[in-house]
Image (cartoon, coloured by chain):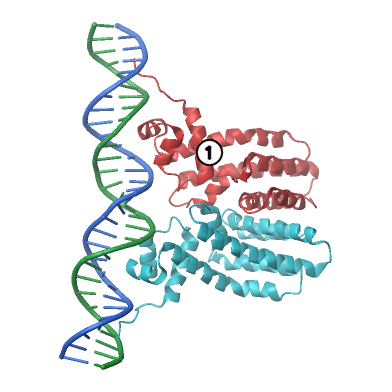
Chain colours: A cyan, B red, C green, D blue
Amino acid sequence: MARKKQYNETEVIEKAMRLFWRNGYESTSVRMLEKEMGINQFSIYASFKNKEGVFLESIKLYNAQIKSITNTLEKSNNGVQGIKEYFLDFLDFSREGAIFKGCLVTNTVNEIKEDTNPVIMAALKRFSLTIRALFVRNLKQDDQRDVQAIEAQADYLMNALLGLSISSKVFNEEQLKAIIKITFLHL
Amino acid sequence: MARKKQYNETEVIEKAMRLFWRNGYESTSVRMLEKEMGINQFSIYASFKNKEGVFLESIKLYNAQIKSITNTLEKSNNGVQGIKEYFLDFLDFSREGAIFKGCLVTNTVNEIKEDTNPVIMAALKRFSLTIRALFVRNLKQDDQRDVQAIEAQADYLMNALLGLSISSKVFNEEQLKAIIKITFLHL
DNA sequence: TCAATAACTAAGCAGTTGCTTAGTTTTAAC
DNA sequence: GTTAAAACTAAGCAACTGCTTAGTTATTGA
C-alpha cells in the first residue's frame, strides 16, 4: 500500500561510482551526486543513508565489475604471466576512451584520511589485500621458494600496480605498457 | 615609516608546507593554515595572495629541502646505484617519526584536478620531470644503449617511486625496503 | 611630536558542504 | 472511494569554504 521507487538502486549507484572514479570522494558533493544519479537528495539518503553509504555501495559495484579481471587471475595457472595479464587487463579496465582514470580504490586511498574516514579506509584496505593475496597465490605456482621471498615479490608487484594508478595520469599508453614490460622482465 | 612584520615568511611557509604534506591541498582550509602558521588570514593573503600562493611557496620550499637528496643524485657517478640510494634517501626524507607521509608532490598530483587547478598541476608536473631527467642522466652513466631503452627504464623507476608514495601508507618499513631491493635487482 | 604607512584584528561576505524536515503526490489494500 | 504508507519535492539548517573589508595598533622618518 505504498508508492513504488521511480529509480533502480543499482543503476543510480553505477552512475555514482563513475562520478567518484573520475572525481574522488571528497570533491564529489551530494549536489553533484544528485544530478549525476538523477534523483533527489532525499532519495539518496533514504536509499543509502549518507554520502559514505553511497561510496561504500560504489566500492561494492567496482569490486563486482573488476571481478571479471580478478576471476581470470584467480583461475590462471600461468603464475607470473597471469599477473602480468592482470596488469594489462587493469589498464584497459581503468580507461575511459583515451584517458586513464586509475583505480577507484587507489585514488581514494591517497585522498582519504584514515582518522576522518575509518570505515571507507578499512574497505579500501580490504580490497587491496584481496589483490595481494591473488598475487601470492599465482607466484606460488612458479616455484616453491620460501613464503617470505614470495610475499616480498607480491609487495613489489603491488607497488608497481599502485604506481600505475598515478602513472596512468602522467604517462601515455605506450609508456605504461613499457613500464609493465620492465616490471615483469626478471620475474 | 611603517610597522614591521611580526612573523618570518619562510618560517610560516615551513609550517604550511608540513600541514599540506600531512593533509593534502583541498582538505587543508585557510582556517587550518591560520592556526598552523600562527598568523591571521589577512597576513596570509597579504604575504601570499591566496591559498594557491601559499601552496606554490610550499612546493618551492619542499623542492629546496629535497634538494639535499637530489643534489646527491645529481653529483652521483654510480649510475643505477645512485638512483637506488635516492630511493632510500627519499624514504627517510618522507618519514616523520614512525609514519610515512609520502611525497608532497605525488600526494597532490593524485588529489588535484587539472582543469580546476591548472597552475598547481603545472608546478607538480615540472617537479616530476626534473626527477625523471636525473634518472635518465644517471642511467646513461652505466651503458650506452639507445635513448629509448633508457627512457623506458626511467619511466619504470618513476612508476616505482610514485608507487612508494602510496605504498608507504600501507606497507611497513621492512616491506618498503624489500620493494626497493627487488625494483633494482636486475638493473 | 606627529603624521604617514604598513601590519595587525576580527567581523562578515557570498557560496558551498552534508544532511533534514515539512509538505505533497503516488500507490495499493481495504 | 477512503486511507495509510511510502516516495517524492523543495526549502532550509548550521557549519564550513576562500576571501575581503572596516577599524585599530605599531613603527617610522621628518
Which one is nearer the viewer's eye here, B58 or B31?
B31
Q: Is residue B35 visible?
A: yes
Image-based side of A57 in relation to A164, left or right? left
Q: From the viewer's perspective, is residue A93 above or below residue B54?
A: below
- Image quarter where the C terminus of chain A lies is bottom right
Give the residue drawn at x 55%, y 53%: A110
Q: Locate residue B53, reporting x and y percent.
A: 44, 37
Left or right: B48 as drawn, with respect to A136 = left
Task: Provide the chain ID for the residue under circle 1.
Answer: B
| Above or below, comparing residue B36 to residue A132 in the picture | above
Tell me if I can see residue A40 in this picture: no
Q: Position of residue B86 (x, y in %)?
A: 70, 41
Residue A152, quarter of picture: bottom right
Q: Is residue B20 toward the left or the right of residue A187 in the image?
A: left
Give the structural element (helix, strand or loop) at label 1: helix
Q: Which residue is mark 1?
A: B18
Q: Quadrant of the N terminus of chain A?
A: bottom left
| Label 1 Cα neighbours within 10 Å, binned few <14 / some 14-19 / many ≥20 | some
Residue A67 place in picture, x, y as percent: 60, 73
Picture coordinates of residue A40 (x, y %)?
Answer: 33, 69
